[in-house]
Amino acid sequence: LFCGCQTSCRRAEVVERRLSMPSPARRGGSQQHAPAITAAALALRFALVAVASIIDAYKPLGLRYTDVDYDVLKDGARAMVQGGSPFQRATYRYSPLVSYPLLLDVKTGLPLAKLLFCLMDVLLGDA
């Protein structure tokens, strides 16, 4: 199409062509290594969850690895277990749906929600 402004039209065509290109992960040779990369990414995240648990337990230099927002979400899950609302905590500002995975943490005492978040991060990043 010619609209009288050749420069703008050419730029628009270049942008459109680039946006329609497949992502590098879906081009050619890298597809055969995708499962290995996904597994490595998941293993690295799980290892970081283990490191976080150790650091949070011992608190070297008084520091924690886990962010305070995770505590807010976990408190919301505790309130839900007790039949309340996560919004009982004044600083809770998330969707109540985010607290549902943390029910696993509250009931088991293990960081299962962190592992679930890692799994979803890797799977959605690979999509």
Image: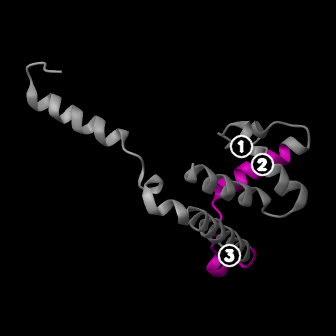
Task: Answer few, some or many: residues within 10 Å of disc 3's Cα (few below 14, many 20 plus, some between 14 and 19).
Answer: few
Task: Answer few, some or many: residues within 10 Å of disc 1's Cα (few below 14, many 20 plus, some between 14 and 19).
Answer: some
Q: How far apart are marks 2 and 1 (CA)?
A: 7 Å
Task: Please tell me which residue lies in front, 91 or 27.
Answer: 27
Q: What stretch is highlighted in magenta?
A: 57-79
Q: Name the residue under label 1.
A: 98
Task: Name the dominant secondary structure of the magenta segment.
Answer: helix
Q: Is mark 2 on a helix, strand or loop?
A: loop
Query: Residue 110 appears in which quarter of the rendering?
Result: bottom right
Q: Where is residue 9 in the image (x, y as percent from the top left)?
A: 16, 28
Q: How far apart are marks 3 and 2 (CA)?
A: 20 Å
Q: What element carries label 3?
A: helix
- Say left or right for 55 vs 13: right
Q: Name the residue under label 3.
A: 51
- Say left or right for 84 vs 13: right
Q: Residue type at mark 2?
A: Pro
CB atoms of marks 3 and 1 within 8 Å = no
Residue depicted at x 62% and y 73% = 63
Residue depicted at x 59% and y 66% = 41
Please say if 38 is above or below 17: below
3 or 2: tag closer to the N-terminus:
3
